[in-house]
């Protein structure tokens, strides 16, 4: 078997969207999560998250 190119591997695995990222859960398993984007509060100040990647949906 030949080694698959990166694009071919992404096709098989489904790839990840630009707003997704990988994180390590409490069991040490690498999983796909959602990227935490900076957001603006009502008073106009920007909040930058300390952790860039979390589980999607806010679950643990």
Image: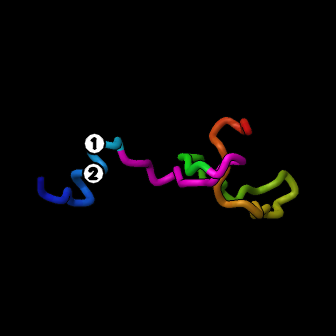
Left or right position of 52 against 13? right
> Measured along the vertical axis of the image, is residue 21 above or below residue 14?
below
Q: Position of residue 24 (x, y in %)?
A: 63, 53
Using a 10 Å C-alpha cutoff, classify the residue at mark 1 as few (fewer than 14 neighbours), some (14 to 19) or many (20 or more).
few
Q: Quick one: 28 or 21, which is closer to the camera? A: 28
Identify residue for label 1: 12
Up-down relation of residue 8 to residue 52 (above or below): above
**Residue at disc 1, secondary structure:** helix
Which quadrant is home to the C terminus?
Answer: top right
At horizontal 27% and vertical 42% (from top left) the residue drawn is 12
Residues at badges 2 and 1 in contact (C-beta under 8 Å)?
A: yes
In the orientation shown, which residue stands out farthest toward the right? 43
Mark 2–mark 1 distance (CA, rounded to whole Å): 5 Å
The label shown at residue 9 is 2
| Image quadrant in which you'd find residue 47 | bottom right
Magenta residues span: 15-28
Residue 11 at x, y = what percent?
26, 45
The reply to whether the magenta stretch includes residue 23 is yes
Residue 51: give its label.
none
């Amino acid at each position: 078997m030949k080694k698959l190119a990166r694009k071919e591997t992404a096709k098989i695995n489904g790839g990840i969207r630009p707003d997704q990222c990988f994180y390590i859960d409490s069991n040490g398993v690498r999983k796909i999560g959602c990227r935490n984007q900076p957001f603006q509060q009502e008073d106009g100040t920007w909040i930058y998250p300390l952790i860039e990647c979390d589980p999607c949906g806010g679950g643990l």
